[in-house]
Image: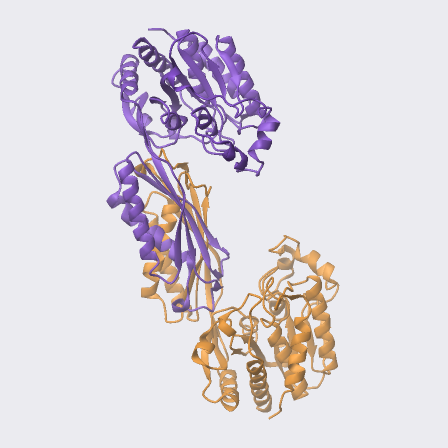
Chain colours: A purple, B orange
Amino acid sequence: MPTIDPARLLSDLHALRAIGAYKTGVHRPTYGTDDVRSRHWFAERLAQAGLTATIDGIGNAIGHDPSPGRKLLLGSHLETQNRAGWLDGAMGAIFALEVARVLGRGIDVAGWADEEGHYGSFLGSRSYAGLLPEAEIDSCKSVDDGTPLRTALQTAGFAGAPRLQADPARYIGYLEAHIEQGATLEDAGEKIGIVTAIVGSHRFRIVFEGQQNHAGTTRMAARRDAGVALIKLAAAIEDRFPQVVGPRTVWTTGRITLDPGAPSIVPGGAEMLFQFRDTDPALLLRLETELEALVEQANQGPCRVLIAYRGRSVPRQMDAGFQAALERAAETHAPGAHQRMPSGAGHDAQILAEAMPSGMLFVPSIGGISHHFTEDTSEADIVLGCQVLTDAAAEILAAL
Amino acid sequence: MPTIDPARLLSDLHALRAIGAYKTGVHRPTYGTDDVRSRHWFAERLAQAGLTATIDGIGNAIGHDPSPGRKLLLGSHLETQNRAGWLDGAMGAIFALEVARVLGRGIDVAGWADEEGHYGSFLGSRSYAGLLPEAEIDSCKSVDDGTPLRTALQTAGFAGAPRLQADPARYIGYLEAHIEQGATLEDAGEKIGIVTAIVGSHRFRIVFEGQQNHAGTTRMAARRDAGVALIKLAAAIEDRFPQVVGPRTVWTTGRITLDPGAPSIVPGGAEMLFQFRDTDPALLLRLETELEALVEQANQGPCRVLIAYRGRSVPRQMDAGFQAALERAAETHAPGAHQRMPSGAGHDAQILAEAMPSGMLFVPSIGGISHHFTEDTSEADIVLGCQVLTDAAAEILAAL
């Protein structure tokens, strides 16, 4: 089997880390100066690897293997969360570059744009998969400062270029490596996770309408306290969900706001952002029914409770053949130290899975930490992960 | 009994309302331009009523009756909450002026500064009661924009003047009229509330320390979700408090914050502002013990829960003799349409009660609304309230 060059791999990772370095992590939001620099840097590396490199109209940095025959697409995203880690995305992109260099042919490489959602939802991978309409580009804005996406693309210098789109006939499928962003592998003392499916998420805004009042003069019986209504529904969810979820379901209330939020005022309004995730689409629908029943019950109280859907993403199964290939490669290089596991986080692979067979591997995250500048993975685990990906890609290409 | 002049009373109330008018209410925060104008306007009216008028170093506009003998002190505050009502404070100050005019002698009148807490806690009445140290004035800042109180007093033109302080030997006691700021009187179809006591409040900041994590990749069993810990404690309070409170206890969670408050991040920190109020000091202490027990219990979970005391105010009993005088006057002018009731809100009378016997009467608030520009009371109820206050003051003075 072809062997990777660990020094070259780590050197490239550290070179990319230097673009937008922040403490021990990186601050490289999509279409910012450092993000644009990183995309040009990556495209140069792709060209040096013998690929035809392009930065397209949405900012994807893509290297096409000019040789004939069907290709395996490898990649991940180049931008980071704000003031976050150096490996989330970057590692998978550099792995893809290294695999292309080691295998010599059969590999296309993608450095996707905006998986982290600074302007939209998986803009780069959706664009390449043919799932991003122009009208959506017109309407996207920076979540940080409201800059229109069109303006950001113009400033970045990407606006003139056409958007590349995958030719389904060209591809055997897509592989992506990523840090786990959880502690499952570390806790188990394992080195490789083979992703079985990427969870779907259902996301809600729940709004409570009561009546604002003086917290000293309004007797309890007369109150329509939106905050109390929220507390009771949130507690009911925490009581009920453990009885109905699956073993890997996660659910989260990430934000609570009381209006006006003053210590001596009975809240007249309240809002919570709630979400749950699982790999089983039927279970997701069942949980939504449970949530609606709890909201219905909450509406029996003195406040009006409204549920709004912020979004639903569908769980995506990873290709069984790719899972098997990744597992064989893992068993070769880390015998007994790998497991099949779902991905609780979203990844570009869930988008590509709509267009072609897809697979993912995880390497351990130290302490399970991600989206923070302390995010890290040991060099040994990084090198091992890249070798496993290389083996699996080689096996898949050889089977053609 | 002396009779008030309803036209003069209402005309003064409307003249004061015009200073800082906002929609149908008033925006007159302490030491702002309109507040300063209103204090000069009020001092002029006091002088016209034959009182020796002073605006002192904390902004209190005070009229001293120059005649010999002990006095009854009447008043309320002149400033308003931001964009709030026209009667909260203003009504009691104008009532005091009218009583002084009608009775001719024996009445001192106070227009207190900053009962509404724009810069501190009951600054004006505490200053007059001898309970406001200079060092506290040094440290107070505007809750709106951080302006130091010293700067605000300088800008207002009050900084040079000495602060007046009550001579205990001068006063029989203090009477204050105020809008109810609740709907108890309106719901009962009654016209006058005779305040039995002003509630004490115990105020807390409860802080939850967990661990921030990715909402997709962190399994439920591994989470230390500060938001869930908060929800559970808040729900436990709502379950437990109804079993242990008194009939008029009120308790409120006015603010909840999750940190970082993002939809896809397990909150690593959370905070709630909680308070309860009652007129019974023993009950307040018992409720604090209950709260501490619930916090102790919450600390058995995966998060650390800390309770910080934001403040405690002691319940203040109103003078029994003053209550009886107010009740007799109420029965004369509104037979059967009055009740004794606690005040759930704080008032300057709770401060003066530390220095002298004090009493309060309430007039109905339409819809129970206050701290909002729609706050209102019918003219008939205003006139009635002022006549009842006049009768009670006359009776108390006559008993000297």
Q: Is residue B135 shown above or below A281?
A: below
Residue at 66 percent of width and 57 percent of height: B149
Q: Is residue B80 shown above or below A11?
A: below
Frontmost residue, B2 versus A56: A56
Residue at 28 percent of width and 45 percent of height: A241
State left or right for residue A40 relative to residue A377. right
Residue B205 in view in this figure: no
Residue at 64 percent of width and 80 percent of height: B10
Report which quarter residue A377 is drawn in. top left
Name the residue at the bottom extreme. Answer: B1
Residue A71 in view in this figure: yes
Frontmost residue, B337 versus B156: B337
Q: Is residue B75 shown above or below B228?
A: below
State left or right for residue A297 relative to residue B280. left
Indicate the position of residue A130 as horizontal and vertical percent values: 44, 26
Q: Quadrant of the N terminus of chain B?
A: bottom right
Q: Is residue B334 shown above or below B120?
A: below
Indicate the position of residue B226 as horizontal and vertical percent values: 39, 44
Q: Quadrant of the C terminus of chain B?
A: bottom right
Indicate the position of residue A1 as horizontal and vertical percent values: 33, 6
Q: How many marks?
A: 0
Indicate the position of residue A188 as horizontal and vertical percent values: 28, 26
Frontmost residue, A361 versus A287: A287
